[in-house]
Amino acid sequence: MAFARVYAMLIIPAIDILGGRCVRLRRGDPSTAVVYEEDPAVVAVKWERAGARWLHVVDLDGAFRGVPHNLEAVGRILQSVRIPVQFGGGIRNRAALEQVFDVGVSRAILGTKALADPDFLSEATRQFQDRIAVALDVKSRRVAVEGWLTTLPLDFLEAAKILVESGVRRLIYTDVSRDGAMTGPDLSGLTSLLDTVGVPVIASGGVSSMSDLEQLAQLAPKGLEGVIIGRALYEGRIDLAGAIARFL
């Protein structure tokens, strides 16, 4: 029996913060929030001890309100772990970006503002280079913004081209319909994206099993750098230490 070759990719645990607590949403809907831990720093330490090399932290309040709102909780995470943190949620101007970096975040994730303000994006990528990533959030091939509450009349592949031409060096791709739903990753969308851009891509949304990770790993040669996992870790469907050992 033939086995697929295993390619290396980062396994990145997600920590979503709403009202200062670690939660998970289904398809970005705040009414579906499930609280997994009162203190996100406790979760961060758990994932670091399991072998995580990066953490993906999202300020959901910031995403909905348009300005970072949970930086105190993020600061506790950064004081509790030694591994780097990538952070997004409400970073829509220069002041917010500098505030996030001042807290100690290693990589800032821009979303809405990246497409709405090309000058801000170009300036950010020029000054901070690889420390900037852009979240490409997609609903039915269209770009979703403002905490996924609004959809732009822009195809995600066209958006990706614009972002890369603006100097973006890394994209984080999320199929919103799959986020928190554990229905499997969007392999078709990811493949199209990887065939379109020449920058590293991190996948997010829908991962529910080791089988999903095996399929995603086959895209590593095309430029898939890693995968963000949330609910499947919190509900024990994927063992973080085992997944890291498998794809390290």
Image (cartoon, rainbow, N blue to C red):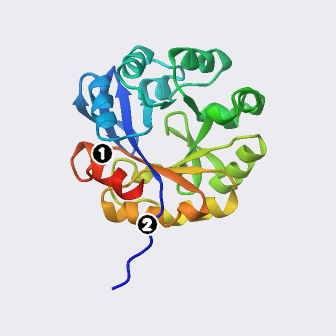
Give me the disc on residue 45: none
Q: In whole angstroms, how far apart are the C-alphas of marks 1 and 2?
A: 24 Å
Q: Which residue is mark 2?
A: 6
Q: Is residue 71 left or right of residue 198?
A: left
Quadrant of image for the N terminus: bottom left
Q: Is residue 93 left or right of residue 148?
A: right
Q: Which residue is mark 1?
A: 231
Give coordinates of residue 75: x percent, y percent: 42, 16
Give 8 or 115, whichever is nearer the viewer: 8
Number of numbered discs: 2
Question: Do we see residue 31 in this rendering?
Answer: no
Q: Residue at x 65, y 21 (%)?
A: 93
Secondary structure at badge 2 equals loop
Please state which amino acid type lies under the numbered disc 1: Arg
Give 106 or 15, whichever is nearer the viewer: 106
Give coordinates of residue 117: x percent, y percent: 72, 30
Question: Do we see residue 182 in this rendering?
Answer: yes
Whichever of labels 1 and 2 marks the residue nearer the N terminus, that label is: 2
Q: Is residue 13 left or right of residue 106?
A: left
Q: Residues within 10 Å of mark 1 (few under 14, many from 20)?
A: many
Q: Residues within 10 Å of mark 2 (few under 14, many from 20)?
A: some
